[in-house]
Image (cartoon, rainbow, N blue to C red):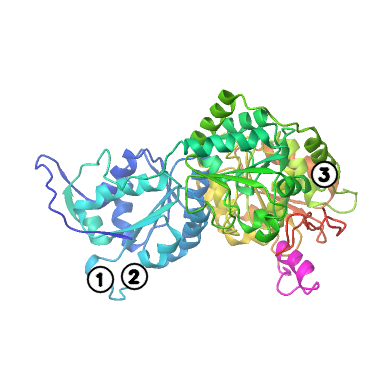
Amino acid sequence: MAEVRQTDRQIGPAQPRVSGAQMIVAALREEGIDTVWGYPGGAVLPLYDALQPCKEITHILVRHEQAAVHAADGYARATGQVGVALVTSGPGVTNAVTGIATAYFDSIPLVVIAGNVPTDAIGTDAFQECDTVGITRSIVKHNFLVLDIAQLAATLKKAFHIARTGRPGPVVVDVPKDIQLALAPFCYPESVPMRPSRTHVGGHAGQILRAAQALAGACRPCILVGGGAVAAQSEGVIAQLAELVDAPVANTLMALGAFPGTDRRCVGMPGMHGTLEANMAMQHCDVLIAIGARLDDRVIGNTRDFHDPARTIIHIDIDPATIDKRVKVDLPIVGDAYSVLRNLLQTLRAGRLERADRAAWWAQIEAWRARRCLAFTQDDAVIKPQYVIEQLWAVTGGDAYVCSDVGQHQMWAAQLYAFDKPRRWINSGGLGTMGVGLPYAMGVKRAFPDADVVTVTGDGSIQMCIQELSTCKQYGLGVKIVSLNNGYLGMVKQLQHVHYGDRYSGSYMDALPDFAALARAYGHVGMRIERPSEVEPALHEAMSMKDRTVFMDFVTDPTANVWPMVPAGSGLAQMLLDSGDIGA
């Protein structure tokens, strides 16, 4: 946290005096912000008053502060730009905490502006006061408490710079009410002095040469693409690397679409619910290059098992703290993924390094792929949730923005909707936040009003932020909601099945609303789909209503589980398939 206090900086007398609230609005305009998601309250009303006459910025009134941050987050994930949320003090800030943490764990650029009680009331337990800086300290890239109107403009400039540069992340700017009301000259700086980064953006040349040699000589290379590769806009150079090295590519949950899901070299998503071919390729390769991936427990399973058999691990990341955090690597390369990969490609081509024979490796991968670990059977009796996702992909041509909540539906969508473009898959990875799907879709639809934007959710997740159906109605955000309704907290139920002897404590939902009727009550189109034969027609009908929000409540098989699965504490080669067999 940085407290910003009085300085001796002088501002020319010719500059007009404006309020702190007007400064914030002017700063948002200077940063090119066209949308702010928020919810008003007493401590932030001066800013709302200043925002009201501004024609360049649209304020979207959500129904809960958590949704404001999620919507700004979804906007940022889809566009790559900084999302902005505005909340009041006390409960406004605490309601926003989950959204801030969600963005932090997935490295999403946000600026969250919070009102606070006047400076002379800070620390007195005033009405709707809380320690915003203390509460958010561990879940932000940085935060500020502004205690001097003279430093407000520079603080805002720093906030946006910090949010979008290096490893992106959320920044909170806490502005007391009296600072919003205070008058001072305003000049928004073109730049601000910041401590320079020691990161060599293009990577260390010697390490890049060693990585090129390792990849060229590998008999069993594998490329792992993480969310950092999406942030670095490196999909083009990743495709070139995959072709040049002729290696299988696995996209983590946060990177789906960074390498095309329909490309023959794509082996799917790795990890806890990854494909057999992705997990086996990662486990049995002799050289693994991880690009912008955290190598967390959901991706690699048991760390001890992951190092057996031994292999050469190359790890590229903009954040040096991520490298060696969970997995000991052989060739760390700190830098921007796009720049490092571009230099790596130049080194591979210029060195004319002889490529090892990979025929046997690809034969093994195709043998794993032939086991069709994601296969399921759809009969005439009950809708399989996987079938809904397959039909959604077919109806949308694989080109929709898919905003997922968290649970079994999330994993089925990740497994079966083949994304060929980055930033089309919007979901909470690191924090695993239920309720994000609908606000995410609102953010994406605001950014791309002509695109097909679909929320894939479950009967549990959707109820976390279902009040945002009201926001969709007020602002004409025509999103499509695909609810895979099985009457359970499905992922909890599956874990209770695998680890707790089918003791289903607290995982069933026996008082569900009529979601179709509820959607209609909010002024939207509501559908309830109960038979397999109705799935494709319902999706076609819903997608044809371009300007309407449509809630499709698919009544799905309550016994369906997400397979394959790597049980907690197990290695990637110890996957449970649908039959219960070990995948290795």
- 323 displayed left or right of 173: right
Nearest the camera: 410 or 4? 4
The local secondary structure at tag 1 comes to helix
Q: Which residue matches tag 3?
A: 368
Count neighbours of disc 2 (C-alpha within 10 A) and say few if under 14, some if 14 to 19, many if 20 or more: many
Discs 3, 1 touching: Cβ within 8 Å: no
Indicate which disc, 3 or 2, sits on the residue closer to the N terminus. 2
Picture residue at 67% right of the left edge, 60% below the top: 304
The x, y position of residue 578, in whole percent, is 84, 55
Magenta stretch in the rendered image = 490-511
| Residue 186 sits in quarter | top left
- 10 displayed left or right of 538: left
The x, y position of residue 562, in whole percent, is 77, 56
Position above or below: 105 against 133: above
- 58 displayed left or right of 522: left
Discs 2, 1 touching: Cβ within 8 Å: yes
Indicate which disc, 2 or 1, sits on the residue closer to the N terminus. 1
The x, y position of residue 438, in whole percent, is 59, 51
Position above or below: 432 against 24: below
Position above or below: 223 against 346: below
Count neighbours of disc 3 (C-alpha within 10 A) and say few if under 14, some if 14 to 19, many if 20 or more: many
The local secondary structure at tag 2 comes to loop
**In front: mark 3 or mark 2?**
3
Q: Which residue matches tag 2?
A: 129
